[in-house]
């Protein structure tokens, strides 16, 4: 039979990162390609205790259907933390113009997909940083066949002039997608000045902002910068995050905080996708957040990543030639390397594969999938210290075989 796929799916490419992770490997292979949290950050002992308690006392609730907007105690716990820590969550009762609501989703990626689903028509433009998270790009393309319009990233965030031009050139855009803090893949953080400018442009051009912040809890250096959502006085920001990086990626617990008129539509759209997010893990997360030292756990994770990132930067400084540039993140999971224009980036990535070192080519993250890139992404959360040291040595050995 000849299969006739929908146009928005027919041209969709699989995630290069997932394909890299599926490729055969052996004990000698070192991967800097994953985006996974470090396994040692999972609170396994505590989760086992909580799970046993749930099955002993609340099994019927945990194994039954739940409501689509999420387990109410978890929604309340997340909303309280987001308000207390980040200043997120407007309330008419506190004197704001509108109410924000918290909705639980099946991983942050579902929140991204739902935002596009409820706001965008088929083929409309979505303004994104370039490069940006491949999961979001694929969600936009597969959901509404979006025209993903890239705005160049500078060291302190998106190019504001280019952002305004993109908004002028694409008046059909209703949504702007940003990862302002420890951006994936670049590891960069948008400055406070630019966050304010972005919000002002969104108001000017009547565009909603989808602020994706899965890495905000992972700051291990520098000063906190207010989220764009905390500046939202007009109800134009949808805030998306998850517990993937601070509890476990596999439990698939994410959340959206947005004006209640927006979350109401998201809940309806979610009902046709998964009915509700895994209730057992919602209950487990709630108990962990409210009965254990959750902030202490976050601090432990920050210490782990502070060490891992510092080690990778130290080893890159030691092993790489000066012409290979890389970012120095203050948090998150990634750093971003840039090759001189004279070097064949595809050949460079293949040379790394040949010495059993996996990195992610930068073109993977481009809004235009056909555009080239001189960059590649490295991850420091997953490899061990020994793998970071050896992997950086291999990367340096490969780099020295290329001359700019």
Image (cartoon, rainbow, N blue to C red):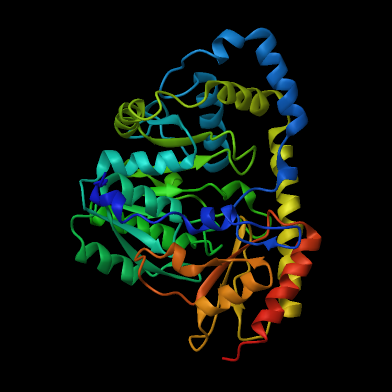
Q: Residue furthest right?
A: 386
Residue 345, image x and y in percent? Answer: 51, 78
- Is residue 147 in sight in this rendering? yes
- Is residue 207 in sight in this rendering? no
* Residue drawn where x is 70% and y is 23% of the image: 291
* Residue drawn where x is 67% and y is 58% of the image: 25
* Residue drawn where x is 67% and y is 85% of the image: 321
Left or right: 300 as drawn, with respect to 168? right
Quadrant in the picture for residue 39: top right
Quadrant in the picture for residue 245: top right
Residue 145, image x and y in percent? Answer: 26, 51
Above or below residue 20? Residue 246 is: above
Which quarter of the rendering shows the C terminus? bottom right
Query: Which one is in front, 18 or 190?
Result: 18
Query: Which one is in front, 152 or 124?
Result: 124
Above or below residue 103? Residue 140 is: below
Above or below residue 178? Residue 345 is: below
């Amino acid at each position: 039979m000849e299969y006739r796929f929908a146009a928005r799916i027919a041209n969709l490419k699989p995630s290069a990162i997932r394909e890299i992770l599926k490729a055969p490997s052996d004990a000698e292979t070192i991967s800097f390609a994953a985006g996974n949290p470090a396994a040692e950050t999972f609170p396994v002992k505590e989760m086992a205790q909580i799970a046993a308690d749930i099955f002993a006392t609340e099994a019927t609730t945990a194994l039954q259907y739940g409501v689509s907007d999420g387990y109410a105690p978890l929604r309340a716990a997340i909303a309280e933390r987001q308000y207390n820590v980040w200043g997120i969550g407007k309330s008419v009762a506190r004197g704001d113009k509108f109410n924000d609501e918290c909705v639980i989703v099946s991983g942050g990626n579902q929140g991204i997909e739902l935002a596009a689903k409820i706001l965008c028509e088929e083929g409309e433009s979505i303004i994104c940083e370039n490069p940006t998270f491949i999961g979001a790009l694929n969600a936009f393309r597969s959901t509404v066949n979006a025209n993903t319009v890239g705005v160049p990233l500078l060291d302190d965030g998106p190019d504001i002039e280019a952002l305004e031009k993109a908004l002028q050139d694409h008046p059909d855009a209703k949504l702007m997608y940003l990862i302002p803090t420890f951006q994936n893949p670049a590891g960069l953080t948008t400055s406070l000045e630019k966050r304010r400018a972005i919000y002002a442009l969104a108001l000017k051009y009547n565009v909603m902002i989808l602020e994706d912040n899965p890495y905000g809890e992972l700051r291990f250096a520098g000063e906190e910068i207010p989220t764009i959502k905390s500046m939202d006085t007009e109800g134009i920001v949808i805030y998306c995050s998850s517990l993937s990086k601070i509890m476990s990626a596999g439990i698939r617990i994410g959340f959206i905080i947005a004006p209640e008129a927006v979350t109401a539509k998201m809940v309806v759209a979610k009902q046709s996708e998964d009915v509700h997010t895994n209730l057992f893990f919602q209950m487990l997360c709630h108990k962990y957040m409210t009965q254990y030292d959750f902030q202490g756990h976050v601090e432990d994770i920050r210490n782990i990543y502070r060490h891992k990132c510092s080690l990778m930067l130290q080893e890159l400084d030691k092993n790489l030639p000066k012409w290979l540039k890389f970012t120095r993140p203050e948090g998150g999971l990634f750093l971003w390397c840039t090759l001189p224009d004279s070097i064949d980036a595809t050949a460079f990535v293949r040379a790394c594969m040949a010495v059993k070192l996996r990195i992610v080519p930068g073109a993977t993250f481009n809004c235009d999938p056909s555009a080239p890139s001189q960059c590649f992404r490295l991850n420091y959360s997953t490899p061990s210290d020994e793998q970071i040291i050896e992997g950086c040595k291999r990367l340096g050995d490969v780099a020295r075989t290329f001359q700019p």
